[in-house]
Image: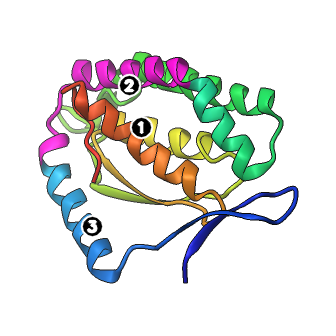
Amino acid sequence: MPIATINPFNGETLQVFEPLTPEQLNHKLDLSATAFFRYRATPFPDRARCMSRAAEILERDKEKLARLITVEMGKPLISSVHEIEKCASVCRYYAYHAERYLADEVIETNATKSFVRYLPLGSVLAIMPWNYPFWQVIRFLAPALMAGNTGLLKHASNVPQCALESNAFFSRLDSTRVCFRRY
């Protein structure tokens, strides 16, 4: 079944997209798993640089991204701009704080040395709702990526252009040769 952008004001179909085939989906799952084994070893300063770059790109492109949200959702443009600004803010927040949050925590036990260590888990799947199409993605991906995981997203079907743009967004980060790649 095709996925469509439908004007929320008049019900007009603006654009139609084909969903992934099972083969394409399996390929993306394989790529994400492979990427995890490389990405988990990325040092925190490199991850922070990536996340800071993400914030810069979001701020630079906020008008374009906000218009896309408004077209697909009917959200007022100023609210859409605020959503993108909030995304940039959370990228900076995790760029600055993630290493400290994920540092080993020494705990008291009868052993010589005991601690809690936070290690990357792998490819993390997120199924996104439609109401904040960029915020929902970034609030998941920023901490997941900073923790050394890779992310797979199943976007809401009623915001397909926002979904494609968020994928393209991470592709643009890869073009900076920093660390994120589109899979």
Check residue 95 in the rendering and tell me which mark sits there, or answer none: none
- Residue 83, given in percent of the width and then of the height, sits at 68, 32
Check residue 29 in the rendering and tell me which mark sits there, or answer none: 3
Distance CA(mark 1)–CA(mark 2)? 12 Å
Identify the residue under disc 1.
169
Mark 1 vs mark 2: give the one in front: 1
Q: Is residue 122 visible?
A: yes
Q: Inspect the image, locate mark 3, and give the three-letter code of the amino acid beneath it.
A: Leu
Q: Quadrant of residue 27?
A: bottom left
Tell me which residue sits at (26%, 80%) in the image: 23
- Residue 48, given in percent of the width and then of the height, sits at 32, 21
Q: Earlier in the sequence, mark 2 or mark 3?
A: 3
Would residue 29 be found to the left or right of residue 158 on screen?
Answer: left
Viewer-proximal residue among 111 and 88: 88
Distance CA(mark 1)–CA(mark 3)? 19 Å
Q: Helix, strand, or loop for circle 3?
A: helix
